[in-house]
Amino acid sequence: MRLILIIILIILVNKTHGQIPSDSLLKNSFNQTIESYFKQIDSTTNYKDIFIICKLDYSTLIKTVTGRPIVYISDSSMLTQKLRPKRKHYYRNIYTISHKNFNNSSDTIDIDISKFIFLPKGQDFQICGGIGTYISSLPNGRLIFDRKNNSWTYLTNQQMRQQCHNKLKE
């Protein structure tokens, strides 16, 4: 009886442990998501730098994309006056990148990038809304755990849209 209990515990521990992505896998997926996102959008900002608020340790995340440097900010409280648009009619885009389990599932992790627009308002600036991808119900990136192969697969937003399109054709 004791042996059966030990075997069941070992199996359960191995199954749940395999569903937790490593930090390096998560950061690699963040890099793929950032690259894919900024390559597909037409940036209409007057600034060269891309500012991204990120809760992860961003030391191993990519530093440039499409020839533009990325400045990571660990906390939204770090948005200081220097990030404020300098000219009257300019604005600055600030992005956030985050991840969460899809529908509280342990085998699907969505990675989402949202954009906030900072507008000048007198000597201060204001947030003019956030634009996320959940409007379209698809995240910018997704990690899916394959139980059969005991591995994680990464999908870009374009790949997910293509899969939806293919299912509609069937």
Image (tube, grey):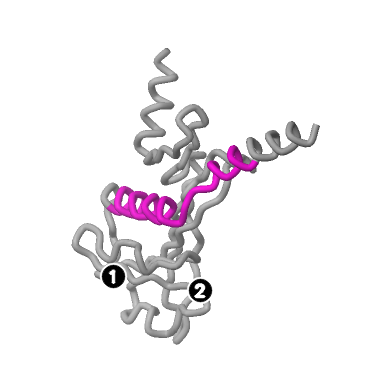
- Picture coordinates of residue 114 (x, y %)? 46, 56
The earlier-in-sequence mark between 2 and 1 is 1
- Picture coordinates of residue 52 (x, y %)? 40, 66
Residue at 57% from the left image edge and 42% from the top image edge = 102
| Amino acid on which disc 2 is placed | Asp
Please state the total of marks drawn on the protein image.
2
Q: CA distance from mark 2 to mark 1?
A: 17 Å
Q: Which quarter of the rendered picture does the C terminus lie within?
A: top left
Of 64 and 48, nearer the camera is 64
What secondary structure characterizes most of the magenta part? helix
Q: Quadrant of residue 27?
A: bottom left
Residue at 44% from the left image edge and 39% from the top image edge = 152
Tell me, for residue 49, which label it has, or none: 1
Dot 2 crowding, Cα within 10 Å, few <14, some 14–19, many 20+: few
Q: Is residue 25 left or right of residue 66?
A: right
Residue at 41% from the left image edge and 34% from the top image edge = 160
- Picture coordinates of residue 151 (x, y %)? 45, 37
Q: Secondary structure at mark 2?
A: loop
| Amino acid on which disc 1 is placed | Asp
For this orientation, the residue located farthest to the right is 1
In magenta, the rendered stretch is: 13-38
Residue 115 versus residue 19 in the image, above or below: below
State yes or no: residue 46 in magenta: no
Q: Would you say the residues marked 2 and 1 are in contact, meaning their CB atoms lie under 8 Å apart?
A: no
For this orientation, the residue located farthest to the top is 170
Q: Which residue is mark 2?
A: 75
Dot 1 crowding, Cα within 10 Å, few <14, some 14–19, many 20+: some
Q: Which quarter of the rendered picture does the N terminus lie within?
A: top right
Residue at 43% from the left image edge and 59% from the top image edge = 115
Please state which of the two labelled residues, at mark 2 or mark 1, is closer to the viewer. Answer: 2
- Picture coordinates of residue 167 (x, y %)? 43, 19
Q: Is residue 31 left or right of residue 110?
A: left
